[in-house]
Image: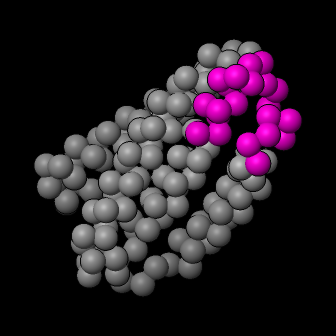
Amino acid sequence: MKLKKSWWLLVIVSLGVIVPFAAPYLTFDPDNSRIRMTSTTIQFPLLVAHIIFACVALISGFFQFIDRIRMKNPKVHRYLGRIYVISVFISGVLALATIYYIENFSKATSFLVLSLIWLFTCWKGYRTAVRKDFASIANG
């Protein structure tokens, strides 16, 4: 099955969002942060690690939807899936740690909910794959 144009549009738009938002943190300079740092000793490294692992998860996740990889190279698909799961769990746990530093309650709550949803859905997908219930994975 060929990938739909809408899927490629999603990839392009996602990368268009990821790159400019992640770029300031890849300098490893707290002064380039897009958010106010209250503790550069631990807050900034946690945030940078969260962003790096989230980018790895998002990029490896896109490849999981390519039929050519999934059908013709299942070992590559499994390897990319492992990278995705590990990246999500690391990024999700780091996100939970960074919530402590968010001063705005509504932002902290939103970040907490998003982090928990990401961790939960990844865990459910991982458990489904371990049980080899591929029909459930394909049907969402």
Q: Position of residue 25 (x, y in %)?
A: 73, 45
Q: Is residue 140 visible?
A: no
Q: Is residue 110 left or right of residue 35?
A: left
Reply yes or no: does residue 135 show up in magenta: no
Q: Position of residue 44 (x, y in %)?
A: 70, 30
Q: Position of residue 57 (x, y in %)?
A: 48, 52
Please name whichever residue, 73 or 40, is drawn nearer the observer in this view of the structure. 40
Q: Is residue 70 left or right of residue 24?
A: left
Q: Is residue 121 visible?
A: yes
Q: Position of residue 124 (x, y in %)?
A: 29, 41
Q: Is residue 21 above or below residue 16?
A: above
Q: Is residue 95 left or right of residue 19?
A: left
Query: Residue 17 appears in which quarter of the rendering?
Result: bottom right
Query: Residue 46 appears in which quarter of the rendering?
Result: top right
Residue drawn at the location 71% of the way across and 49% of the way down: 26
Q: Which residues are magenta?
A: 27-49
Residue drawn at the location 37% of the way across and 62% of the way down: 80
Q: Residue farthest to the bottom?
A: 2
Residue drawn at the location 79% of the way across and 40% of the way down: 29
Reply yes or no: does residue 32 show up in magenta: yes
Q: Is residue 101 left or right of residue 49?
A: right
| Figure quadrant of the N terminus | bottom left
Q: Is residue 20 above or below residue 34?
A: below
Residue drawn at the location 78% of the way across and 25% of the way down: 37
Q: Is residue 37 above or below residue 66?
A: above
